Every structure is written in structure tokens, then in C-alpha cells.
Amino acid sequence: MKTVLITGASGGFGTEFAMQLEQQGYALLLHGRDKARLKLTLDALQYPERHRFVFADLSSRKETEELIDSLAGLELYGLVNNAGFGVWGGFAETECVAQADVLRVDLVAPVMLAHALIPTLKRNQGFMINVSSLAGETPLPYMATYAAVKAGMTFWSEAIRAEHQGELKVVTLAPGPSPTGFRDVSGAPKGKGNGFSTSAAKVVSSSLQTLQAGGGYCVPGWRHKCLWLIQKITPRFISLTIMANYLKK
Ligand SMILES: NC(=O)c1ccc[n+]([C@@H]2O[C@H](COP(=O)([O-])OP(=O)(O)OC[C@H]3O[C@@H](n4cnc5c(N)ncnc54)[C@H](OP(=O)(O)O)[C@@H]3O)[C@@H](O)[C@H]2O)c1
């Protein structure tokens, strides 16, 4: 049975990836930090005996390296770089460690995992899905570090996709707002961007359709596509002013 590693499988998109990839017949390595939360994902699956847990705090280089070491010798078929979080707030007023951890979890760890696993994924003609964000399409005041990190994720993932054309299917997934644990963790004010909200199920199924089509840049659902279009046609000096006012608490 083909095995897929999903990082951040303890909630939100991660749980949804687990459910939809299981339906496609994959065995899963469910990554998280907390056994009890991962167990909730496992409980939502049909064949729990097929899957197993792996643990690592991806803000820790040591734990990320230990996770990579534990994967040696495994014939992985897929990698879903999904784990991530954001920190909302004025840059100078928000803790530096938390913002540096956004970089480590959302970008450095995916780079390390991909670098270690691409040879195996290529050998197995498998795939990689990198969960970026529409936040990576435009600078976001009050989520400055998160937006910068997701811009990095999008550029990195798209470049990797081009480098491995024909050898490895790569999806760069760029969702907008979706009702997961993300808002609570980031501390973002409630209600912002709700008009564009799209379910986690739709976000994940769109990315798997893009994968089936051979990989690509995926903006899921019509609401997120509208948001993407608005981002593309709005000059930066205008969007910065609007977003600075809109995202301020
Ligand atoms: N929801 C949105 O509106 C939205 C929009 C665009 C992009 N995204 C992206 O989607 C991805 C998944 O987020 P989500 O929306 O599903 O949020 P979520 O429900 O909060 O899930 C985030 C996942 O990442 C894991 N994670 C967080 N910090 C970690 C760390 N230091 N080490 C290891 N794992 C860690 C969490 O594990 P724990 O349970 O251990 O905390 C959890 O499994 C993220 O990359 C996020 O940036 C989300």
C-alpha cells in the first residue's frame, strides 16, 4: 500500500487530507505534536489500523531532523507539507520568538522534509502537496511575517514543481480563509474575510483534483478564486492601505 506523510494532521486541513487520501486508498503517516489530538483524526478514519503516528515540534530543528531520520528506509509515495500557523498583530508588538517559529514551521521544516524525501518520492513517481496561502500573494499588515513566509512557500514550491516536471507531481495549494483552528491559533480578529470562507473539504478536494491533473498551482473554490483575482488587479499601494485599515483590530 502506498504511504503518504501528512504534517499537521491533528486538525483542520490535515484531518481533511487524512480522510480524503484514505478514501483514495493510501496508508497514512499522521504527523502532529499531541497524541490525543492526532487520535481524534484517527477516529475520523475508516481503517485506523492502516495508519500510524509520527511526532515532532517542527519549530525545533532537532525534532525535525529526528523525524527525518525516523523516515529513512520508508518507501514514501507522498508528502503533504501542511503544518503551519500564523501570528496576528503589529510586527513590533508581537513576540519575536513566535514570529521566528512561523518561519521555522511553515517554511524551514517543509524545505528540510522535501529535501530529504524528494529522492524517494521521485523513485516512486509520487507527489508533494505544499500548503501555502493567498496570504503569500500580497503583503499583509498585521500578519507581516506570515504573509512573507507564505510568499516564500509559494515561490519555493512553484520552483520545485518546475524543476521536477515529469518526475514528481507537485501541488502548490493557496487557499484563502477557511474555518479551521487557524484563526484561534493566530489570534486574528473574528469575522475578517468571512465572505470568502471556503470549507476545508473543498480546499482539500480541489488540491487533490489538481494533483490528479498532474500538479499545479491551486486556488480552491470560486470564493478564493475571486479573492485571488482581487489581489491580482489591485495596485499594491491601494491594497496595503485597505488591508492596514481592515486588519487592524
Ligand atoms: N485556515 C485557513 O484560513 C488557512 C488559509 C490559508 C492557508 N492555511 C494553511 O493551512 C495549513 C493548515 O492549517 P489549518 O488551517 O488546518 O490550521 P489548524 O487547524 O490550526 O492546523 C494546523 C496544524 O499545524 C500543526 N502545527 C502547528 N504548529 C506546529 C508545530 N510547531 N510543529 C508541528 N506541527 C504544528 C498543528 O498541530 P497541533 O495540533 O500540534 O497544534 C495542526 O495540526 C497551514 O499551513 C496554514 O498556514 C490556512
Image (cartoon, rainbow, N blue to C red):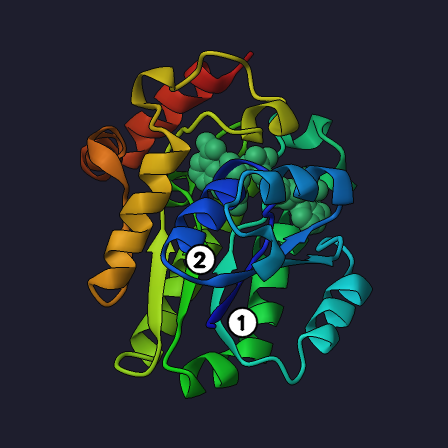
Is residue 185 visible in this depiction of the protein?
Answer: yes
Q: Where is residue 63 in the image (x, y as percent from the top left)?
A: 79, 63
Q: Does residue 99 appear left or right of residue 116 in this picture?
A: right
Image quadrant assignment for residue 34: top right
User: How many C-alpha atoms fall within 10 Å of the one at disc 1: few (<14), some, or many (≥20)?
Assistant: many
Mark 1: secondary structure: helix
Q: Look at label 1 and name its amino acid.
A: Ala
Mark 2 or mark 1: which comes first in sequence?
Answer: 1
Q: Does residue 190 appear left or right of residue 230 in this picture?
A: right
* Number of numbered labels in the structure image: 2
Q: Look at label 2 and name its amino acid.
A: Asn
In contact (CB < 8 Å): disc 2 and disc 1: yes
Q: Quadrant of the C terminus?
A: top right
Residue drawn 50% across the image and 29% down it: 141
**53 w.r.t. 184: above or below:** below
User: How many C-alpha atoms fall within 10 Å of the one at disc 2: few (<14), some, or many (≥20)?
Assistant: many
Q: Where is residue 86 in the image (x, y as percent from the top left)?
A: 59, 36
Residue drawn 46% across the image and 79% down it: 121
Residue drawn 75% across the image and 38% down it: 36
Separation of residues labelled 2 and 1 (CA atoms): 10 Å
Q: Does residue 182 appear left or right of residue 192 in this picture?
A: right
Q: Where is residue 135 in the image (x, y as percent from the top left)?
A: 42, 39
Residue 63 marker: none
Residue 114 marker: 1
Q: In which quarter of the image is ligand 1?
A: top right
> Which residue was labeled with disc 2?
130
Q: Where is residue 202 in the image (x, y as percent from the top left)?
A: 31, 36
Residue drawn 68% across the image and 42% down it: 39
**141 w.r.t. 206: above or below:** above
Is residue 29 visible in this depiction of the protein?
Answer: no
